[in-house]
Amino acid sequence: MVKVFFHMKRRRVSKFTEPEVSFSEKYSSKLAKPFENSDSIIVAGKLQKLSYGLHIRIAKDSSDPNPILDLFLGSYTPPRASDTDVTPDPNPTHSLYFLNRNEYFLIQITATPALFEIEINGRPYVLEREHSEDSAQFLKIGGSIAFLTQVQHRAANPVEWPLWQSSNVVRSENYFLSDFPVQMQAGQVVVITALPYGISGGSLEICLTQDAHPVPALKLCAEFGEPQSVTLMGMDSEQELQEEQRRDSPFPFQINRKFRLAIGFTLQCFVLAINGNNYASFRYRTSNLPSSLNGYYMRTTEPLKVKIISTDHVNSGSDSCDGFEGFSDFSHSVD
């Protein structure tokens, strides 16, 4: 395990195990593949006004008490002890405050056999690994975060990244994107948990991207205004977006209530389930699906906002994704 506070203004940083910082989880992910040498994880978003910092853990499983990386980055100005709902850094004399409160951040962590190469808002640092053979498949992000805009897991030799993906910080509370670092196969399921919030109105879009095409292979658009509706669309053989299905009732989403969406990949179609119930299927319109999928993005229009809570990759055990709807049930835990 590497447990670290970044401290002192050095390009090569050391580690120490004390003091302990409590972990307040805001986002979790079972990765599509283990985090291995030459892989990168990119985390971007914005800190709260009274933020004490950002916490990133990479572990072998969801309950692992000894993650391979336990990284805490303090915010720029230590909050006052009197600030409510804020835990000040317990030892500010040993912590360099890398991140500014109420500002955007971009962190990239790359694994090498001997080091974690860590870039913080464009500034490079290196951290020695204790056990280079360790790999992990669970990512947890905590701290006092206003919102996340990117959580990317990129493999050593990825396929061409779609046009909308970038290592630049996405400066929008209404946008979130995530990569698929491996080729998707029939039987795999992506499970997205999120919270739409705000006031009634606006729309939520969840889009699966294919190769470098700007047009999504699948687009779910939920209208939260009146009338409420859900539309499924996809890219056709002419690389244009075609509407296929529109549903007005029942509307499966609610403002200020979490939802869990499972998207399964079969040999012929996407299958969707929401909160434990089968919702729809959508046949593939282009070739090389699902293997050419490489990520998803989620965005909203005002006044609606969305907070991403988790993204998990699981295998249903069958090409037809039998029983995949169980992954969208909140009583189901991802192991």
Image (cartoon, helix red, strand yellow):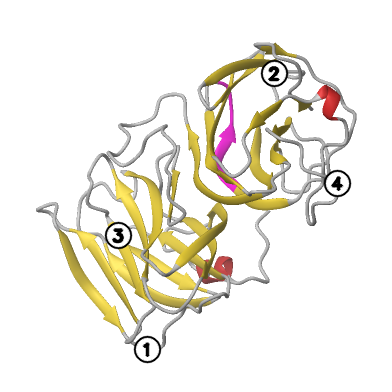
Evaluate if marks 1 and 4 touch, with contact meaning CB atoms under 8 Å apart. Answer: no
Residue labelled with disc 1: 249
Task: Point out the frontmost of discs 4 and 3.
Answer: 4
Up/down of 27 relative to 133, above or below: below
**Which amino acid type is shown beneath numbered disc 2?**
Ser
- How would you rate the neighbour count of disc 4 (Cα within 10 Å): few for under 14, some for 14-19, many for 20 or more? few
Residue labelled with disc 3: 218
Residue 2 shows in this picture: no
Mark positioned earlier in the residue sequence (4 or 2): 4
Task: Point out the frontmost of discs 2 and 1.
Answer: 1
Mark positioned earlier in the residue sequence (1 or 4): 4
Up/down of 223 relative to 25, above or below: below
Instruction: Identify the disc placed on residue 184.
Output: none
Element assignment for label 1: loop
> In the current view of this chain or complex, which residue is farthest to the right?
18
Mark positioned earlier in the residue sequence (3 or 2): 2
Residue labelled with disc 2: 132
Give, as a single range, the part of the protein colored magenta. 30-37
